[in-house]
Every structure is written in structure tokens, then in C-alpha cells.
Amino acid sequence: MVVLRFLRGWAARFRAGKMVTPVAVIIVLLCFSLGGTLADSGPPRKAVLRVLAWPGYADDDWVAAFEKRFHAKVEVTFVDSDEALWARMHSAALPPFDVLAANTAEVQRYARAGLLAPLDLSLIPNRRRQRPYFQKLEAIGGLMGGGSAFAIPFTYSSMGLIYDRKQIAVAPHSMRALWDPLYRGKVLDFNSAQHNFSFTALSLGYRDPFQLSPAQMRTVARELVRLRQNLLSYYTLPEEATALFVQHRAALMFGNYGTQQVALLRRAGVDVGYVIPDEGALAWLDCWAVTNGAGNRELAHAWIDYMLEPQIAAQLTERQGLANTVTVSPGEESLLGQRLVWIARVESIAQREALWQRIEAGERLGSFPK
Amino acid sequence: MIKLGLTARLSVLLVCIGVAASGATGYYSYRANRAMLMQEAERSLLTSTQFLTQRFTVALGDVAADVLVLATLPSSVAVARGEETSRAGRARIEQVFLQFMTHHPEYLQIRLITRSHHGLERIRVERGAQGIAVAGESEFREKGQFPYVFDTLATMAGHVYLSPIGLTPQSSASAGGKPAVTVGAPIVDPDGSKVGVLVIDIDLAQVFQRLGNDLRSSYEIYLANEWGDFLIHPDPNQTFGFERGRRVLMQASFPATGPLFGGGAADVTFNVAAPAGRMPAQAFAFVRSPFGLVDGNRFIVLGLGRSLTTVLASANVLGQQIVRMVLIWSAFAVVLAILFARALARPLRVLAHAATHIFDEAGGEGLPVSRSDEIGVLARCFERMRFEIRSQMKTLHAKQRELTHLAGHDTLTGLPNRMRFLEQLETAIAQATLTAERLAVIFVDLDGFKQINDRLGHSAGDRTLTIVAQRLRAALPDSCIVARLGGDEFVILVAGVRLPDDIPNAVRLAQAALDEPVTLDGHRMKVGASMGSSEFPADGNHAEDLLAKADAAMYAAKTSTHCRHLCYQELTAKEAFADCSRISKLA
């Protein structure tokens, strides 16, 4: 009888095809209950630091060392675009993060939106190790507000001019070289609305490349059509640019990824030079800031301070090819002050995007009014 | 705990073995069948994928042929050159382009682009929301900066350029955001210089829809470029992740496809379990194939996925049948096991019965002695053993009976001895007590025995005793018990005394028997005897008591000269003589 009943049960399960499911469920439940009790019986909770950053800004070994030193747990969330960063910051009433990394333009935007907490600079002693330029926060646009500092510079990159030294003997002095008919079909440009308008405006000598008047906008658009006519192609990714540069023996390139791209090209065997034009080069400067949703502000400050340590700076440059704000590279200090133009909010992203789409698609010069 | 018999235990064991065997066989055949079906599904899926890949290559070849045909039209050269005289030719080409667009729903646009004017479009026929349209002069754009222009111009005459698979621009007349590929061919003038390019944009989704028409609708198509970025995926959000700065790689979504991108095997098949439960939900086949006619390094990975529900449905049907068969066989096994266990246990039970009833005459009946197997051997051995034991026991019983007889009887006369007599007397007393009867014990002592012994020897004495015993036995009724106490002393138990004369009668009969002379070796010898009697219940309640009192009475009689028999009561009444004379007179 027992045998029969067992058989019937077995057959039913067999038919349902879930013979192992109950066993699995029991095991899983057991695991959960065990896990729960284990977790409950653990030591008192560690402080948690929630970091919102870009890939390469919070490597695992840095995080592990920080966790060990401060007996804290660090939860890192990576973002790959300014839009994603904005979305993450707005995913809850209070930003669900303690510290974030953003460029100067974005920092300005977050500060205005009231999402950042004023920094207590005394909690960041490693600032003294930074190069003098980066210590003067008030001189860098967008980092201060209402007399208090909101962000500390961490890393930066310029968008200079890359040229093939084999084809161009003398280093160009201006981005205008991109328009030179001498290099027609040998020029590469980055496929993006904002930076193209800004660097063209800079090359035309406009005072504020981020706030263009309608007339300036029209001029710049027509200039960009002319630039397109001089191009080989547009690129999006640094690897793509390198491939085009090598395969088609390009001579000049707007280096959206700056020194990172130079390193890639040199690795590919191209003898390239990198110049910051006389009119100045666009550059982004990523900074660390503390959100107003920070649960543990001291820990957040400790993170920023930790990020300014010399070995982190050195590893950042070594691993990512990005310039840091601590190590001194001689001769660059003057360049920082005068010729790097930190990107800022532009007058109208939508307008630039709309114009750019037309330019990139190949609309003729005639369709852009003077 | 209930103790199970051998039959029950053997039945349970056999049932377990039978059920386990049929269950295990059923389960493994179900598993094997299922695995086979899945393998078969994967194999057929792989064939479909390879077939689809081939057809895709052929389809691209067809497009390349179209591009080459259009690029080599004489009017194409004229239009590309921008000759003013080519108005008529231009209209013709537009018609041809329209025809091609009509017949190839996967063509998004066909363009003729001149090399001059920064790659300005000369003819553009495109598929829009309102159908196929020929673009006007004002809508022409400069396309020189696109690889499909400068790379096609770098292509040799008679060859085609194949772009990487990308997305159609969002702003184009079509819905946009579709996976597309551009095929181009240079337009070469009679001098051999390339004056323009002819390009066709193809909607890959359409291509695969057409190619996959004969595939089952449940099949899902996957396509990835050489880096693994999804270009076609059932979930459009997974495609062209790199366009949104978030790469979605095939080798990450399906780790089994890793070798395809690492230069390993050219195809893989596998199945993926559904998130819930352990049933594999989908089978996949992925095939790597070269892509692009310009250089040979590029490749694509094409994959098909299909739900295994239908495949496994048949496995489950079989599974149900197997379950049914297992149940039937189990029931069969139960019956068989019980029958077998009983068949095996029956001879054992017969043997056990025979062993229990080993001394019964019928105990050996039904033993399976005629069987030729081990049970038969056992039964025969047992039967022999039984016979041996029974005969031995019979002898033993006889010996025991003899011993018992010897213990209770006098060997010379065959009469009960003193011990036996006392037992019988006790029994008789108990009996008489119940029936309220009287009984008497008569002590007999031979008078002339000593003289016979002395004169004629012990042998004659023994013969005398034997004769006396026979005579007493013969003279007295069967209800009386005659015993020899030893020497020349005999005793008579007169049971069931109802009449007052019963005892004197017995005394008289005994005296008469003993007074008869005995002839020994020619001598007639007179024996005679003195007797004393005691009565129950008048003289006592115990055997020994009665015997002692009879003895005492006998002794008094022997020493008296007047009488040869005395009652104990007479002895106590001191009227021995009178009575004695009375009795003697009676005798």
C-alpha cells in the first residue's frame, strides 16, 4: 500500500516534470534561512559608502584598500554618459549616492539643482598634494557656489589636435588646419554636436564658445559644412579613429579623447604629434562631489581625500591614460591656466543637435543660411 | 513493530526489486529519449542555421550582382559624370531603380553618388512611409565622408564593397533604427577612372524575415558582428548597444558562443534552461560565417533559437506512457512477487508442519519428496530423519514402559511390589472416599514357606512363591489387587466393599487357595498363611496406616494359636479369641 502510494506520487511528479523542484525549493529555503540567520548573527553593520562614478575611477583594488582602511563597505555604480549620471541622481527623492564624479559642466548643473552638499575642505588634507592650479577652486568655473566649494578636481583630458608627423613637418598652431584644403580627404573629426560647435567657435576666436549668438551659430554651422567637405570621415570610438587613421593614412584629427588617442595611435605604429592650439583646446575636468543625500559625509570626504593620494593618481594615469591633478608634469602648468577651456553648459543642446544632424547627413552648404 | 513472516518479507523484497527495476528502466528510457530528442532538435536547428547562413550569403551575393548590374549601366556613368545630356538616361535609370525597389522589399534605398561635389547624390530612390519615392534635386546630399563612398571608390572595378552592419539613421524617411548593410560598387567610365558609386541599403530584418519564411515562426533569429555586439535579437533593446554606449555582447548573453569569437569552432549548439524550473526551455544553434567581400577578416555570427516545449511535449507523452507501463508492471510485479513468495514458502511450511507433528502418523503426508530440486532433497532427508527418530523413539518408549513395570512389580511373581501397591492403595482410598465405600487391606504371611525353603532349597521357595501368587490371583476376583511386599509377605486390597461379607469372603478365598498343598519335585508341601486385615475408613485413612494395622493384625493372628486371621478392630477390642474362633468357624 505504501509502495503504491509512493509510486502514485512519484508518477504524478514525473508527469508534471517537476520532480526535483520540491527538493530544490526546500534546499533553497534552507539556504535562505541559514543565510538569514548567519547574516543576522554577524558583527554590527559597517558604514556603507555609495559611489557613482565612471569606469576606471573606482578600480576594485582601490575600493578594497579603502574598505580595509576605513572599515566600510563601498558600493560602486558605474555610468557611461552624462545622461545616465543625471538619471541615476534623480532615481530617488534624495540622490541614492554619497559621492559622485562629474565634469565641471555637470557639477554646475547639479549644484544649481541643489543636489550637492558644500564640501568641508579641512576634511580633504590631500588637496595640498594637488598641483597649485587645481587648488584654486574659485579660478575653475562651476566648482564654487555661494562661497562654498562643491567639487574637487580629479582628472582631466584635453581635446587637442593630433597630426601625423610624417606628413606634417611643422606642428599646426590652430584647429583651422583641419580646414586646410592641403589635407582634403585626410582629416578625421569626432561625430558629436556640442564639441564640434565649441571648438569651431574657439578657432574662430569667439569669446565664449559655449554661448553662441544666432549669428555665430549660423557661421559655425557653415564652417562645419566646410570642415565636412575636407574630411575623410567622422569617428565615434577611439579604436575606430585609429583604424581609419592607419588604413587611410590620415594627416590630421580632432582628438576628442586627447592623450588616450595619441597613445593608441603610437601603439599602432603611427608617428603622431599632439598639440593644444593657440586659441585653446576644449577640455573636460572630472571632479568628485558629495551629494546632499550623503548618509555619512565624513566617509564621503575620506573617499575624495583617498582619491587624491599620489599612488591613485599615478595608477589612474598609468591605467586609463588620463591626466591626474597631483603629479606635476613640467611645462603643462601654463597650458592649464591659459589654453585649456573647461567645457561648460551650452546655450542649446537641441539646436546644436538638430544642426549637427543635418551637417553630418551631408546637407549642402547652400541649405545653411549665412 | 509487526513481525513479518517470510512470505511477507520475501514479497516486499521482490515487489521492491520489481518496482525499482521497472521504475529505473522507465526513468532512464525517459531521460535517454528526452536527451535524444533535444540533441535531434539541436542538430536540426544547426542545419537550419547553416542553411540560413548560406542563404544569407547567397542573398548578399544577389544584391552584389544587382549593384554591379546597375553600376555598369551606360546611363549610370553618364549620370555620375553629371553630363547635361543625360536627362533621358537619368529618367530611365530612375525607372530601373524603381523597378528594383519594387521587386526587392528589403532594399531601403538605391543611390547613385558622384565622386565630385564631395560625393553628392545624383539619384536617390528610397522607401519611405508613403512608399517608394524618387528624391528631388534639392534633397541631394554630400556623402563623401561616409565609408561606403570612399571605400567603394577604393574598390576595384567589378567588385563590391560591403559595409559593416549598422543602424539606419533615425532621420531617414524610413522608420529608422533598423539593422542595415550597404552594398556599393564603383561606377567606372570607359577610361577606367571611377566617377561615382552605386550603393544599395538593405534592411537586414527584412532579409531575414524573407529567408526565415520557411522556418517555423517560433524560431528566433540572432545576429552579431565580429565583436559579438547583437545586431538582431528578439528583444530590440539588446541590439546595437554600442550605438547607445552600452554594449550587449552575444558571448556575454550566451557564454557558450565564446569559442565562435575566439577563433574556435565555427558552430555551437546548446540549450538553456528556463529561469524557473529545470526543464531546458530553449535550444540554440550559432554559426560563424565570413562577412564582407572586401577583406576576409570580418565575420558575423548567426543564430537560431527555438523553444523546446514542443519537442519535449512528445518526450512528456512518452514519459506518461512509461509511467503507466511502470505502474502496470509494478502491479504485475506485486502479484508475481506474492505468488512466487508463496510458492517458495509452501514447501517450507509443509516441512515446518512435518517437523512440528513429527510423531503424528499423518505428519509426513504432503512432503514434497518427489521434487527433484533442493527442496525435494531437503524433504527426502527430512522424511528419512523423521523415520529414524520415530523408530528410535518407539524403542525408547518400550524400554521405558518395561522399566516402569519393573519399578512397580515383583520380578519373581509379576505382582505389584510394595511401592506400586501403596500407590494403588492411595488411589483406591481416594476413590472410596468419593463413593463412600469401604475397602480392606489383607496382610498375608505364608506359614510353611521357611520349611520349604530349608528343605527343598531357594529355587523351590521361589517356585512356591510363584505358585502362591498365581493361586491368589486366580482365586480372588479381578477387583482385588494382589501384591507381594517382599519375602513371603503378600497383601490383598479388596476395593469396592459394599456387603458385610465381602471381606470375609476374600479372606476365605485366599485361605482356601493357600491351604491347597503345593507339589514341588514330587513332594506335596502344605503352605498355609496367617492373615490380618484392616478396613477403610474404620481403621485409618492412609495407605501406610492401613498396611501397618493389617500387618499388626496378621502378626497377632500368627502368634495366636486359635485363629489364622484377625481383624484390626478385633485386635483392639481384646476379644481376639472369641472372634478368632468365630472366624475360624466361618472359614
Image (spheres, helix red, strand yellow):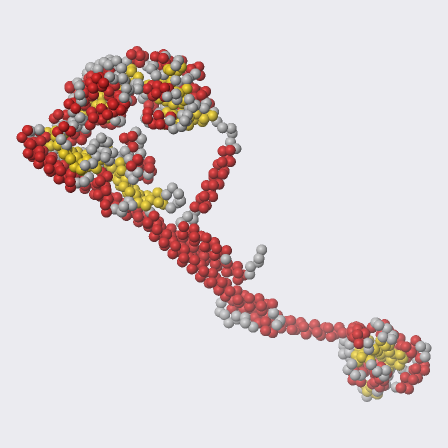
Query: Is residue B522 visible from the viewing direction of this image?
Result: yes
Q: Is residue B234 left or right of residue B358?
A: left
- Residue found at the far left of this picture: B85
The answer to which image quadrant residue A166 occupies is top left
Compared to residue B552, the image places residue B251 above or below, namely above
The residue depicted at 20 percent of the width and 26 percent of the height is: A358
The residue depicted at 46 percent of the width and 53 percent of the height is: A9
Compared to residue B316, the image places residue A252 above or below, namely above
Q: Could you say where residue A213 lies in the image, as x and y percent from the top left?
A: 24, 17
Query: Is residue A326 visible from the viewing direction of this image?
Result: no
Q: Could you say where residue B167 lies in the image, as x and y percent from the top left?
A: 24, 33
Q: Could you say where residue A261 lies in the image, as x and y percent from the top left?
A: 27, 22
**Quadrant (top left/top right/bottom left/bottom right) for the C terminus of chain B:** bottom right
| Residue A4 vs residue A52, the one in the foreground | A52
Q: Is residue B215 left or right of residue B347?
A: left
The answer to which image quadrant residue B398 occupies is bottom right
| Residue B81 vs residue B486, the one in the foreground | B81
Q: Is residue A189 left or right of residue A97?
A: left
The residue depicted at 11 percent of the width and 32 percent of the height is: B187
**Quadrant (top left/top right/bottom left/bottom right) for the N terminus of chain B:** bottom right
Q: Could you say where residue B45 lies in the image, as x and y percent from the top left?
A: 28, 46
The residue depicted at 55 percent of the width and 61 percent of the height is: B5
